[in-house]
Image (spheres, helix red, strand yellow):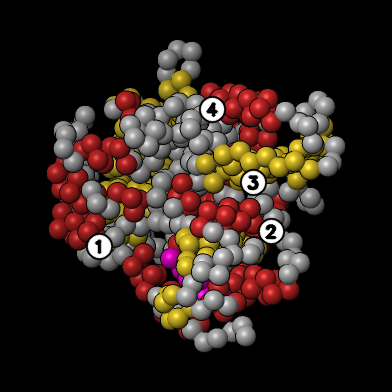
Amino acid sequence: MYELVVETSTNLPYDVRRAIKEAKERENKGTRAALSLSTITENIDMADEHVLPICQDTGMLTFEIKVPVGANQIKMKEAIHSAIRQATKDGKLRPNSVDSLTGENSGDNIGPGTPIIHFEQREKDYIDARLIIKGGGCENKNIQYSLPMEIEGLGRAGRDLDGIRKCVLHSVYQAQGQGCSAGFIGVGIGGDRISSYELAKKQLLRDVNDENENEKLAQLEDYILEKANTLGIGTMGFGGEATLLGCKAGSMNRLPASFFVSVAYNCWAFRRLGATLDAETGSIQEWMYKDGEKITFADDKSDQKDESDERKEVVLQAPITEEQIRELKVGDVVIINGDLHTGRDAIHHHLMDHDAPIDLDGQIIYHCGPVMLKDKQGEWHVKAAGPTTSIREEPYQGDIMKKFGIRAVIGKGGMGPKTLKALEEHGGVYLNAIGGAAQYYADCIKKVDGVDLMEFGIPEAMWHLKVEGFAAIVTMDSHGNSLHEDVDKTSFERLAKHKEKVFA
């Protein structure tokens, strides 16, 4: 189980690698999307080479385990917990299990409800163990529909295949770049509210290239994969050709009164592996999702810039002045050197009513919950440090920037109108880093200067970092411009073109 956990966290499966490679080859050179895919593929190789987390967000670990009749599931659960504790201690997972009432982090990824373990008995003599590690950013973009209903942009969706089609297409639109597109979706049709979501998540255990045995569902999967990639959302929501990399759907019976369509969204960092195990010894017999050639990206030059690319590149080092910020425009690439301070949900909530532990005037806040390890000398080291989804901080961000004089925030997926207004009034900027690229950004962090508010736990503490060559893209500037708003508008217009009935 330890080997399964570590391999899932650090080594992307072969079918997912192939899908990302194909998306990269389709993308237009020199675009923001191409730059994002270049960073993503570099990160995949780095994580694999160094056996470190692909993404800093451990998310929710879900085990689906099929066992022979008579297997001791109690002992198996104990072994899984032991493996997770060790993997967390070794820096392969971020401590991610938080008490919902107190906010206290367990520190070892074990707690009521975490991890999720499903056992199923069957009359075979070996164990089939599969694990999916699904980050919080993409988990938050899961969505459930109850038919019949009106769907924004697509009109009435009835209790039929065409109504299902509208739900699934809308689910891709609403995710935008907040779920770290280009992504994968699992669709659950029928059941009750709980079993429908469970069915959707189980679809993510299918191989990206398999074909649905149900002809109608196979048609639905092909249709969604084609049409989703016409919406123009693109990688990280920057616009582009690749929005969806895979769609898998399953159905089950339902009650006459209920008709649920549930969609489980998964980011490009599709951490899902499995293995068959010897039932007597527990040793791995064969890996799943590792058929065919293993794609690596080290020698791939398809992301090279087009000679016509004239995107502005600016170096920033805190403390930053308002004048420097006002010169930045959406689309500029910013290279950050020097000080960077992390701040997530707990920090933003805390700062609304308390003083900051350091002077934040002219500083940069990074929406990031890193994976950190302390060495024998007591020094902290960053093991993974990609951005978290920024929209969660929308209620706080503008107020905190004004209160403390913060000039820039870094995250992923963009923010909303309240933050955009504050950026314009205060003279601030939002910088979009590439979601999931935890090794790429960890490599830019040269030193940990210290940490404050450790009582919130490692992911939520305020880490003070020294960085070099930290690249991000301006997607919201101080002049009222938002790339996220623009992409949302154009993708909605394209979504609305699919109102007409397709499936009888």
Name the disc covering residue 208, or none. 2
Q: Which residues are magenta?
A: 165-174
Residue placed under numbered mark 3 in the picture: 272
Question: 114 or 257, which lies in front?
Answer: 257
Q: Is residue 388 magenta?
A: no
Quadrant where the C terminus sits is bottom right
**Residue sitting nearer the eye, 257 or 499:** 257
Mark 2–mark 1 CB contact (< 8 Å):
no
> Which residue is identified by label 1?
417
Contact, mark 3 vs mark 2 (Cβ under 8 Å): no
Indicate the amino acid at tag 2.
Val
> Along the polypeptide, which appears first: circle 2 or circle 1?
2
User: Judging from the image, what secondary structure is the residue with disc 1 in?
Assistant: helix
Across and down, in percent, residue 304 comes to 56, 60
- Tell me which corner region of the image, top left, top right, bottom left or bottom right, holds residue 44: top right
Question: Counting other residues with Cα less than 10 Å from the Cα at mark 2, is it few (<14), some (14-19), or many (20 or more)?
Answer: some
Q: Amino acid at mark 4?
A: Thr
The circle drawn on residue 88 is 4
Please state which of the two labelled residues, at mark 3 or mark 1, is closer to the viewer.
3
Q: Is residue 141 left or right of residue 326?
A: right
- For image coordinates 55% across by 86% down, the residue present is 501
Q: In this rendering, does residue 50 appear at all? A: yes
Closer to the chain start, of discs 3 and 1, is 3
Q: Residue at x 85, y 37 (%)?
A: 125
